[in-house]
Amino acid sequence: MSRGRLAIHAHFHQPLRIDPFSGVVPEEPAAAPFHDWNSRIAAECYRPNAERGNLRRISFDLSPTLAGWLAEAEPVAYRGFVGAAPNALAQPYHHTILPLASALDRRTEVRWGIRDFELRFGRRPLGIWLPETAVDLPTLRLVAAEGIRFTILAPWQGTRIDGGDLDTRHPYRVDLDDGRSLIVLFYDGPLSGAVSFDPNATTDAERFAHERVAVRLAGRPGDGGDPLVVVATDGELYGHHQPFRDLFLERLTDNRPDHPAWEFEIVTLPAFVAALDPAALPEARIVERTSWSCLHGVLRWSAECPDAADGRWKAPLRAALERLATAIDVVAEGELARLPGQPDLWAARDAYVEVIDGAVEGAAFAVRWLGERATAHSRRVLLDLLEAERWRLAMFASDAWYWEDPIRFETKQALRAAARAVRLVDGVAGTRLEARLLCDLELLRSPSTGASGVELYRTALAEVGQPPPAVAASP
């Protein structure tokens, strides 16, 4: 009989820090002595884990926007991730809370994430990490339709279909009610919590292995088979949030002959799932619209929530950006209808990730969609509108709503993304969407300073050297 198994999964993500107007990361004094937080976290976490070989012994997902920055700014760390490609899972592109997104936005986020994965890792992804593990059935149906076989959820995000206790030491099959199913691995709550939040739990890898992991693996799961324990955490935990945690990870996952043998086998999730027969798995159902970091479903990213001290600004901000997104889409569809070949906005948008990732030149992309005879002006209109779509998708990154106050960098970054998108569209179509955006932003206030959304918008632009809106706060 084989031993039980332990899989460590690390979710690597940082807020998108590049200025949407210049394409560079502004200096962040709080990250000193480094230029910015990306650089600091790379030095404390990404590079050490790559150099120690940790990425080759765990499974992980790497957010596409962070991967793009690493490829340019931290090649050593980036090569470490790419070199561990068999262990990688995909991630939707902008870390958007998918159950709160429209159907077309979900599709683009998932397709961009999968295509970015293919371009970086050279293969189709077997699994996907959903941002904040926020889940509902439409999202699972979408990822399954795109060829994804499995995802990872928190233990409170599922129930057994037969009413029994959910044993997280066993993979499950979730029926999606459309002829498809998806494998779900539920991570171990106590162990994942200990690694994330208990500094005493990880001071000694051998003690952790023998006294915690082995105990959790004791006994077979109720459905038979050798047990699997999944520890899932933020990847930045290993060396950035917790100094020396990368050393713990190295020791825990390295079973070299000169190390004492653990009572279990270290496995990676893609390799583990590849050997599974979904039909042989017990069935579970998901708990709709739940996540791993909000005890109230997905409320943290849409309204007031007890997990954040004061979230009265969140619903007005989401409503303002959703109205802006709808307006941008309507204008973009109308403008594309005037171009040669009348390209479909949604199909062109789904394909535009190749331009963002540098796999296709913008000029070649425009020719593909408009034809060789299209004028330079028509090509510019197409590319400007799709660039506007890129940033209007980016403004829904989950980080903007996570914290208690919109004066933080993450919310300002969403406002900068909105400004970039709306100014591109107003420039192409002669519309005044920015004026309408300002009207909607007047509805929100910072709970700490009382600053309105318009004041926050102006400050966010001023901090990256962009001119204030040339319109009053009325349409």
Image (tube, rainbow, N blue to C red):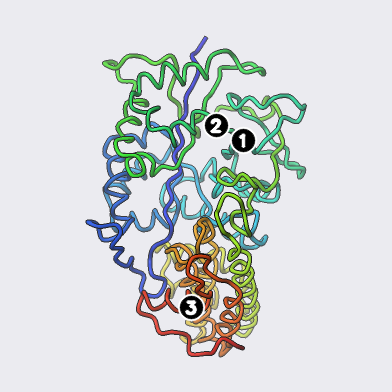
Percent position of residue 258, x then y: 26, 16
Percent position of residue 317, x then y: 59, 68
Residue 184: numbered disc: 1
Q: Residue at x 63, y 59 (%)?
A: 303
Percent position of residue 117, x then y: 46, 50
Q: Amino acid at mark 2?
A: Gly
The residue positioned farthest toward the left in the image shown: 33
Cα separation, mark 1 vs mark 2, equals 15 Å
Percent position of residue 459, x then y: 42, 76
Q: Is residue 134 above or below residue 164?
A: below
Earlier along the polypeptide chain: callout 1 or callout 2? Answer: 1
Label 2, on which residue? 189
Front-most of 375 and 84?
A: 84
Q: Amino acid at mark 3?
A: Glu
Using the rendered view, name the quadrant where residue 431 is placed: bottom right
Marks 1 & 3, CB-CB < 8 Å contact: no
Q: Amino acid at mark 1?
A: Val
Q: Which mark is in front, 1 or 3?
A: 3
Decide if residue 29 is in sight here.
Answer: yes
Label 3, on which residue? 455
